Amino acid sequence: MKILTGNDLKSGAVTWWTGKGWSLDVNDAADIGDDGAAIIAREEGAQNVFAAYVVDGEKTAGAVRPAHIKERIRALGPTVRPDLTLKPNDPDAIARVV
Amino acid sequence: MYKYDEYDQQMVDTRVAEFRDQVSRRLSGELTEDQFRPLRLQNGLYLQLHAYMLRVAVPYGTLSSAQMKVLGDIADKYDRGYGHFTTRQNIQYNWIKLEETPDLLAELASVEMHAIQTSGNCIRNISSDQFAGAAADEIIDPRPYAELLRQWSSFHPEFLTLPRKFKIAVIASDTDRAAMRLHDIGIKMVRNAEGEIGAQFYVGGGMGRTPMIAPMIRDFVPLDQLITYSEACLRVYNRYGRRDNKYKARIKILVHELGKDEYTRQVEEEFAHLLTQPIEPPLAELERIKTHFADPAFEAGLSDELDLSDPDFALWVGRNTQAHKQPGYVVATVSLKPVGGIPGDASADQIRLMAQLAKDYSFDELRVTHAQNIVFPHVKKADLYTVWKALEQADLATANLDTVGDIIACPGLDYCSLANARSIPVAQKISERFGSAERQAELGELKLKISGCINACGHHHAGHIGILGVDRKGVENYQLLLGGCEGADTSLGTITGPGFNEDGIVDAVEKATNFYLEKREDGERFLDTYRRIGMAPFKEAIYG
């Protein structure tokens, strides 16, 4: 699947396109097919997000997994600070990313 | 230390106001990201892997306790309770919100700090010896010259759009503690046969994807020509440095391709021209700056005795303190490398504690080192035990300076958008594998440096043992280098062979160090043994 990511303008936080809006949780990411360029133009133009780009991913059992480790770390947070990730109470979260 | 005059303060305050307006226009949509990006980068605000990152300049690594306290407060107020001290003697915050940045910069300005020229193709923060003004082996305090260069390079209109970023280091002792020859310009303050102080210029060093050791192009530049000669070096680079290929745009490539002799000839020609149109600041300005770096009010007649009956304290004193030029005082380094910790990270509370200790016991002064540690430059030996006890309670008393545990590591793929592999987990695993004091003592001086990509922010080329993280089809892989050194005998590490995975690289480091222990002769450091016997036997030990 193709998923779309960018950064929130005010906070810089990593966000994922859900098909209707933007979410901090990569599991909310929608398969955008070939619509990436059009969505980026619209959403960046509306100041909803910036530095947006399309990445490859796959969806299994309801979880979206970006193909590249860099995007998986972006989606979770720093692997060396579990307390600062989006899943601070999930001891297996980092193992799934790496 | 240097105090801003009205011009310095006005420049910084004006920049804060200007950036506040730019942020406001960005948030309102008046500025696009393409328009805003160069403006935020000029103020040290990057977009990194998880959020905006702010890099704050610490000129030549020198901080007052008041400045350090504000850095701790900022970590709490604007970030997530910590900061990261970098290999450029700066501090970075990883979780900054754009809308809060102007207020953050205003707080920095209130203690004479900023984030200007910590990004972009300009002259970056001037770095220096972290023991400047305290070291027993320096011929003079290098910081006034670094400060003069800071003033010259700040907003220098000719050098704000260089072909590539530009880094300068200034030292004043034979023991190079600033990796001087791995800078675009390295300046070593020296004394000539007549006893006059001047500057020795090394140009064209650097790490990154094409590491080079800077050759000396002039052995003595008089003090009243320091800025003029620097200007000549930059002018030739600005004129002929490549702008068509960012990977060949650093001055090291120009010096290499022209050859040292031809580059030097052009610099000397430009220098002669510049001498006809005086641009050098008057020596009175240098003298004014020097007054800011006068020695603090050291007490005379103090004892050099230390009570070392506490074995843990004795270990720390042996590892983490250096001789001071003033009897009765010592230079103490706080390791930000606890066993299994994140190199260079410090919590807001730790930062404030170090600020308070500097205020109480080090004449209000601290230094950031390029090895990502903090220095109290002037501690009375009689106070040292009290300082150590306070550090110990805050997990800041790790006794591992310059050992295998004192690892330099860039933020790597955990934070950096340029990285290909994570650096910090590798540093943590090596730190844990070699965590015992006995093992570190057995190995002695061993500088280990890790970068998460070829840009080499973790100085892997200059490690006795260097590690470079690379991307192999989406999988992290780590190359091992041996034989690098950043001191007076600067050398570049050589890759041993095929790379390793995360656990494999830790094992490879252990094989290399075990082989060193087996082969070393009396008094040899790891680097000495490597230089004596060469790569081949180490390679056999690692891969055989």
Image (tube, coloured by chain):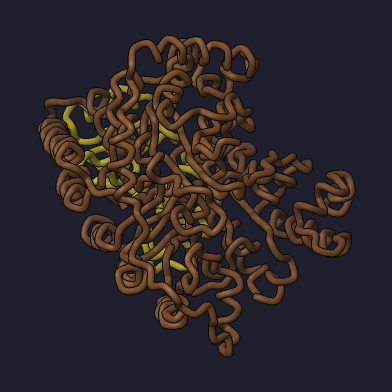
Chain colours: A yellow, B brown
Instruction: Determine the image quadrant of residue A29.
Output: top left
Instruction: Determine the image quadrant of residue B348.
Output: bottom left
The residue that appears at 45% across and 45% down in the rendered structure is B142
Q: What is the tally of numbered marks visible in this picture?
A: 0
Instruction: Determine the image quadrant of residue B40.
Output: top left
Is residue B40 visible in the rendered image? The answer is yes
Residue A77 at x, y percent in the picture: 40, 53
The quadrant of the picture occupied by the N terminus of chain A is: top left
Placement of B392 over or under A8, stated as above or below: below
Placement of A93 over or under B287, stated as above or below: below
Residue in the foreground of this view, choosing between B432 and B399: B399
Q: In this view, which residue lies farthest toward the bottom? A: B309
Is residue B508 left or right of B31 when viewed as pictured? right
Residue in the foreground of this view, choosing between B156 and B348: B156
Residue in the foreground of this view, choosing between B235 and B37: B235
Is residue A98 visible in the rendered image? The answer is no
Residue B75 at x, y percent in the picture: 28, 59
Placement of B186 over or under A95, stated as above or below: above
Is residue A69 left or right of A11 when viewed as pictured? right
The residue that appears at 31% across and 64% down in the rendered structure is B364
Residue B207 at x, y percent in the picture: 58, 35
Is residue B38 left or right of B256 when viewed as pictured? left
The residue that appears at 51% across and 58% down in the rendered structure is B135
Residue B299 at x, y percent in the picture: 38, 72
The residue that appears at 57% across and 15% down in the rendered structure is B263
Placement of B374 over or under B491, stated as above or below: below
Q: In this view, which residue lies farthest toward the front? A: B194
